[in-house]
């Protein structure tokens, strides 16, 4: 009696034999038929779907030896920083000594959850990252933080060059302040103008405003405040969290010589961080010193003594 395994090997050995000339020719002929003359796939050929070519952000994530992705996250942040610094390669003169007032919206509009976990908590986290990045890029500059809370201006930290003081103040406000009431652009800008009024003229005067509301509750005419900011040579940049507001656009244009690129409305969390960190790069330096008004005594020689 023949072995059953041997019968199976003998019966299947014909399928494993290499194809002859006829088989190879048939395979080449079928390959030609699968493509048309213009290079497009034939109607019967397998078509690749568009979703198969999508590049997903987690495909390039590599875990470290401890199983975490902290190294990959740090690498992405460093790549974003290099991209921001190399974006404008035009040789221009930038301000070295900066005086910047960071104004945070602490109104009830910051309780919205369109940014996770909330606008308020994400803003505080980005504000801490901003303070660290700001002093890394501008080691001899100074910073002050103000909040818009319940229709008033709330001083969070005074003008100073120690990042630890600002980080501590932000940490304390995260547990003691709850977003409440309306925001007041005029009160916050007036307090920021008072912070920058006595700064020396050889440094820049800047305001970065994080605005989450769509309206402002002001005690007076905000256009008077805008005129005062223009007169004091204070540049204002605004990051909007909801939508574009006409008065914010006018504020940025008038304080930046008609340039409205300093006003941006976020699209998502990543865009929010990008717009905020863009303010850590020193602005282009301009001779913004006020000319001394002419006196009626100019040109008259002084008497000899």
Image (cartoon, grey):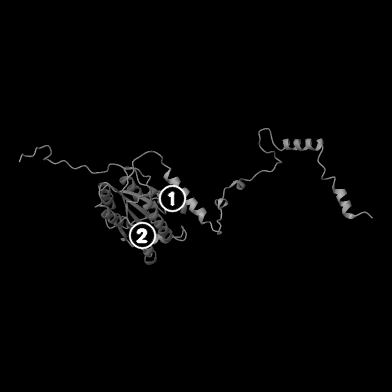
Mark 2 burial class by Cα count in 10 Å: few <14, some 14-19, many 20+:
few
Closer to the camera in the image, 163 or 245 = 163
**Residue sitting farthest toward the bottom:** 176
Position in image of residue 214 (x %, y %): 38, 55
Q: Which mark is residue 10?
A: none
**Residue sitting farthest toward the right:** 1
Q: Which mark is residue 164?
A: 2
Q: Quadrant of the N terminus?
A: bottom right
**Residue sitting farthest toward the front:** 65
Q: Is residue 236 above or below residue 181?
A: above
Q: Quadrant of residue 290?
A: top left
Position in image of residue 230 (x %, y %): 27, 47
Q: Is residue 83 above or below residue 105?
A: above
Q: Quadrant of the C terminus?
A: top left
Position in image of residue 57 (x %, y %): 54, 51
CA distance for labels 2 and 1: 23 Å
Residue at horizontal 39%, vertical 66%?
175
| Label located before the other in sequence (2 or 1) | 2
Closer to the camera in the image, 32 or 18 = 18
Residue at horizontal 43%, vertical 46%?
84
Q: Quadrant of residue 112?
A: bottom left
Quickly name the residue at label 1. Answer: 274
Residue at horizontal 89%, vertical 55%?
4
Question: CB atoms at circles 2 and 1 under 8 Å apart?
Answer: no
- Mark 2 against mark 1, which lies toward the viewer? 2
Closer to the camera in the image, 25 or 230 = 25
Is residue 275 visible from the viewing direction of this image?
yes
């Amino acid at each position: 009696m023949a072995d059953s395994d041997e019968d199976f090997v003998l019966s299947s050995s014909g399928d494993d034999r290499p194809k002859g000339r006829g088989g190879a020719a048939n395979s080449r002929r079928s390959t030609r038929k699968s493509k048309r003359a213009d290079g497009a796939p034939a109607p019967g050929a397998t078509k690749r779907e568009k979703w198969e070519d999508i590049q997903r952000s987690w495909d390039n994530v590599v875990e470290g030896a401890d199983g975490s992705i902290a190294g990959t996250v740090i690498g992405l942040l460093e790549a974003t920083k290099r991209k921001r610094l190399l974006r404008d390669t035009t040789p221009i003169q930038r301000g070295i000594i900066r005086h910047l007032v960071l104004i945070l919206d602490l109104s009830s509009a910051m309780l919205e959850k369109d940014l996770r976990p909330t606008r308020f908590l994400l803003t505080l986290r980005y504000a801490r990252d901003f303070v660290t990045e700001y002093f890394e890029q501008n080691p001899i500059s100074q910073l002050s933080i103000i909040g818009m809370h319940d229709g008033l201006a709330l001083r969070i930290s005074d003008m100073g060059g120690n990042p630890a003081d600002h980080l501590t103040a932000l940490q304390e406000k995260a547990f003691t302040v709850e977003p409440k009431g309306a925001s007041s652009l005029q009160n916050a800008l007036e307090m920021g103008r008072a912070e920058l009024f006595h700064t020396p003229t050889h440094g820049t005067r800047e305001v970065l405003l994080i605005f989450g509301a769509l309206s402002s509750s002001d005690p007076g005419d905000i256009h008077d405040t805008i005129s005062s900011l223009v007169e004091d040579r204070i540049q204002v940049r605004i990051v909007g969290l909801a939508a574009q507001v006409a008065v914010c656009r006018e504020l940025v244009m008038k304080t930046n010589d008609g340039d409205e690129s300093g006003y941006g409305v976020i699209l998502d969390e990543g865009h929010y961080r990008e717009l905020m960190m863009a303010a850590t790069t020193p602005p282009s330096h301009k001779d913004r010193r006020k000319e001394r008004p002419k006196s009626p005594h100019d040109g008259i020689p002084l008497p000899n003594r």
